[in-house]
Amino acid sequence: MVKEGLLYTKEHEWVKVEGGTATMGITDYAQEQLGEVTFVELPEIDKDVEPNDEVSVVESSKAASDVYSPVAGKVSEVNTALESNPELINEDCYGKGWICKLEMTDTRALDSLMKSKDYEEYLKEL
Amino acid sequence: MNQDKGVFIYQKEQIQPIGSSLYQEHLKLTTHIADFAGYLMPLWYSSISAEHRAVRESAGLFDCTHMGVLGIAGPEAAGFLNTVCTNDVSTISTGRAQYSYILDAAGNVLDDIIIYRIEEERFMVVVNAANEEKIKAYLNGLIKNEVVLDVNHPDRKLEHKPEIRDMKDLNNEDCRVDIALQGPASLNVLNGIIIDKKVFETVSNLKPFRLVQTEVQDVDCIISRTGYTGSSIGFELFVRPQKAAQLWNLLLEKGGRYGLVPCGLGARDSLRIEAGLPLYGHELAGPFVISPFEAGYGWAVKLDKDFFVGKAPMKRKSQTYDMEVIRIELPGAKGIRPVRQNDGVLDNKGVCIGWVLSSATIEAKQIALVYVQRGSVEEDTNVGIYYLARSQRQVQEGKKKNIKKGENADADITGKGVSRFEKF
């Protein structure tokens, strides 16, 4: 499932842009591939990130997947609910399973992300 | 004597994965399919945890049609198997099965296998899918006198030379593939499909490691009470590859009312880990070159036999090993980082005594099979686990990427030793 109105990376992260804030998580395709998520390593608040920096690690019993920042910014909020309920990523990856919010310092990298239609096409080719 | 004869060396070929005999059925049931040992196999259908639970509480059906099945027949068969396998084939009569190992002349484990004695002079040998081509090449190399039998006596000759057939080959009139039915409700499921009361009675009276050749709704079937899940009640059904889908669908259709579900490789792995069963390349052989003695299977290596390939080096290994495979239990609720292969195992002083080989999250706990200093972990002994760095952040925080025996570290999670095996 791909949600409209979000931006997507080739590594299967999604980004929701609201003003200067970017909320991000992993896509339905990514959580399907991982299976039951048992642990999420959240980034530190105030951490400065560049595009493609690792911000989180999502682990299932069989695999660990690095999550990369799609933009430059500072981590302003993390979804602490994932600490005790990592399965929210399986249940609601675009909603309650969000991972962190970034205050963007440079939005140029957003231009290279895919819109929902493009991401759908991209998934078909995998 | 063949002057070029050497110790067996196998170069694995890269092959394009092919679908198993049940591939078309899997496509109808799941999108989670991956290449495993050259076969496109299901990882899970619903979820690993739900499938695991089904096998413990009711029953699960596994596609094992990727497993290698070799047919070894004729008057030379028993003698040949007793020369190339570590266990004593002469102790199993018709209708029985036996766990065993195939070693090379240097005592390296080439595979762990189950030998089924279908008739007095007809054996079926089930080998790991990942080792199938290697084992075929090895056994044929021995028969053709191309590889050394005994490093101490290079001119030693193989006395028994039977014909070896690939029983998955459709050109073979007695071709067979394996479907496993495992869990406490397995007999109820079989009762639903075996119409002949006498046949069902025979099957329900099968003791562990016994088998019967019969028919299930006109499908020729070898049913053995064996498996790889630790279930007290579990069967493997060996059928013609052309009939595999028919039997698979029949079982799922009739077994649903008893809670039977199809299970993928994920649950197959977590079930065998929970039961303490070794997987070749992890708890046997592999990077640590783990011997059957270290794995807890010394009983399957009969050092009192006159000869078997690899006997002398294996005898030395039996006398000197200082590491062993142990099963441990750790917390595993949601939100606890799972332990992984190669993470360090620590004693109560924080000294590394070994490493994690395999692990699985089962309900709210984790079960791991670990390779540790022999005698250092008993039941209820506290152990710690040091997680190796898996992310950039952990590397920045000073986490190691590997850990050596004897190094000191702080435990990230603690648990305890449990019995080496568990039956369900």
Image (tube, coloured by chain):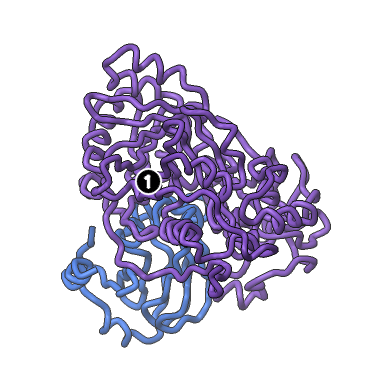
Chain colours: A blue, B purple
Up/down of B187 relative to B87, above or below: above
Q: Residue at x 24, y 48 (%)?
A: B170
Report crowding for label 1: few under 14, some 14 to 19, many 20 or more residues within 10 A (C-alpha): many
Of all chains, the one bearing label 1 is: B
Number of marks in picture: 1
Viewer-proximal residue, B207 or B124? B124
Q: Considering the image in quadrants, where does the C terminus of chain B appear?
A: top right
Q: Considering the image in quadrants, where does the N terminus of chain B appear?
A: bottom right
Amino acid residing under circle 1: Gly
Q: Quadrant of residue B175?
A: top left
Up/down of B69 relative to A119, above or below: above
Up/down of B77 relative to A101, above or below: above
Left or right? Give the position of B308 relative to A109: right
Indicate the secondary structure of the residue bearing disc 1: loop
Coordinates of residue B343 in the picture (x, y in percent) = 64, 62
Residue farthest to the front?
B1
Left or right? Give the position of B232 relative to B370: left
| Residue B101 is at least partly visible in this image | no
Residue farthest to the top?
B197
Q: Residue at x 46, y 39 (%)?
A: B75
Left or right? Give the position of B75 relative to B165: right
Q: Residue at x 39, y 44 (%)?
A: B71
Coordinates of residue B363 in the picture (x, y in percent) = 52, 40
Viewer-proximal residue, B164 or B284? B164
Coordinates of residue B164 in the picture (x, y in percent) = 40, 50
| Residue B110 is at least partly visible in this image | yes
Q: Which residue is mark 1?
A: B264
Residue farthest to the right?
B349
Coordinates of residue B401 in the picture (x, y in percent) = 63, 73
Viewer-proximal residue, B16 or B102? B102
